Amino acid sequence: MTARIIDGKALAGVVRQEVAEGVAALVTGGGAVPELAVVLIGDDPASHVYVANKIRQTEAVGMRSRQFVLDAETTERQLLDVIETLNRDPAVSGILVQFPLPSHIDTARVVTAIRPDKDVDGFNPLNVGRTAAGMEDALVPCTPLGVMRLIRSVHADIAGLGALVVGASNVVGRPMARLLLQELCTVSIAHIRTTDLERRCREADILVVATGVPGLIRGRFIKPGATVIDVGITRIRSGSGNEKLVGDVAFDEAIEVAGAITPVPGGVGPMTIACLLANTLSAARMAVARSKAAEADASAAA
Ligand code: NAD
C-alpha cells in the first residue's frame, strides 16, 4: 500500500482564496480592510524570513499589514506598550508577536497582554480556554487549525476515530488534542516521558506528530491505513552539504503503511500561514459584528 500524499501547499492555496473572497465580501458590506500588525524583536534571520512571508501573504489576499521591528534590547515594558497601542487601535484586526522572544522578556506576559479578540495566534489564555470549551468565538492556534483542515481533506467525519498526538506543547500538541476531542475523536497525548510510544502509535487511526525529533516515528509504528500528519520541521545538513527540511516521521517508511500522509516540506507548514490569514479575517468579522451589535444597542436605548 502506498499512502495518498496530502498536499498542504494546494490546500493552503484554497484557504487563501477563501480568505481573499471573505475580505472582498467584508469590504463590500461596508467593513474596513482587515489589518494584521506583526511585531518582531531582534535579528534572528529565520524570524525575519517568517515575518516577511506572513506580510507578503497577508497583502496578497487583500488585507493590510503593519510591521514593527524592535531591536533585541527592547525592554518588556516597551514591548507591552507597543501591544497596548495596537490593542486600542480600531484599524488593527489582528496582532502577531513573532516568537521566540529574547530571554529577558516573559513570553506568557506578552501573550496575555494581547487583546483576546485580536489574538490571531490563539495563545492568549482566554482563547486557550475558549478552544478547550469548544466555543465558536475562539481564535484557535494556526498550526492545529491547519492540521484539522488537512485531516478533513481525507475524512468527512472523524467522530469515534482513535487519535494520538505526539508532542504536548502549548503551541501545537495541546490545542491539537483539544480540537480532535471537539470532533469526538478518542484522543491520547504522548510526550517525552511516554512509555511504549510504538505500541500507542500503532493504535491510532489519526497520528499527529509534533516533537521536533527527526525520524522519531518509524514505518512500523504506524497502523496500516492511518492518516499521518507530520508537524515537525528540522533543518539538517544532507550528505552533499546542502540544508534540507525534515519532519518527525520517517517518510519513506511511513508512506508504505499509512493511508494518507503529509510531506515535509509542503504539508503542515503552508497551512499554518494560510490559517493565520483566516484568523485575521475571523477577528475582523467579529469586530464588525461587535460594532453592529453596539450600534443596535445604542439605537434601542435611544
Ligand atoms: P516543543 O519543543 O515546544 O515541544 C515538543 C514536544 O514533543 C514536547 O511536548 C515533548 O515532550 C515532545 N517530545 C520531544 N521528544 C519526544 C520523544 N522522543 N517522544 C515523544 N515526545 C517527545 O515543540 P513545538 O513548538 O510543539 O514544535 C514541535 C515541532 O513542530 C518542531 O519541529 C517545530 O519546528 C514544528 N512546528 C511546525 C509548525 C508548522 O507550521 N509546520 C508550527 C509549529 C511547530
Image (cartoon, rainbow, N blue to C red):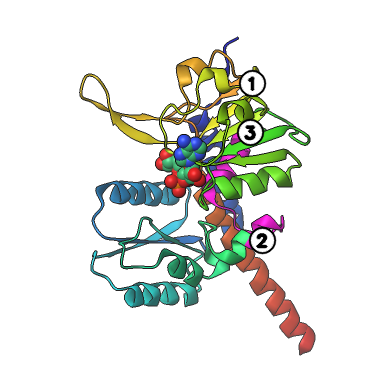
Name the residue at 31% across, 67% down: 104
In space, the residues marked 2 and 3 are separated at their CA atoms by 22 Å
Name the residue at 58% across, 15% down: 257
> Which residue position holds label 1?
223
**Residue 58 percent across, percent down from the top left:** 44, 51
The numbered disc on residue 130 is 2
Say whether disc 3 or disc 1 marks the residue closer to the N-terminus. 3
> Which residue position holds label 3?
151
Give the residues drawn in magenta, as a range.
129-150
Mark 2 closeness class: few <14, some 14–19, many ≥20 residues within 10 Å: some
Nearer to the camera, 142 or 27 = 142
**Residue 255 percent across, percent down from the top left:** 53, 17
In space, the residues marked 3 and 1 are separated at their CA atoms by 16 Å
Say which of marks 3 and 1 sits in front.
Answer: 1
Name the residue at 55% across, 26% down: 6
The numbered disc on residue 200 is none
**Relative to residue 192, is residue 82 drawn left or right?**
left
Dot 1 amino acid type: Lys
Q: Quadrant of the N terminus?
A: top right
Element carrying mark 3? helix
Nearer to the camera, 218 or 22 = 218
**Relative to residue 270, is residue 134 drawn left or right?**
right
Element carrying mark 1? loop
Element carrying mark 2? helix
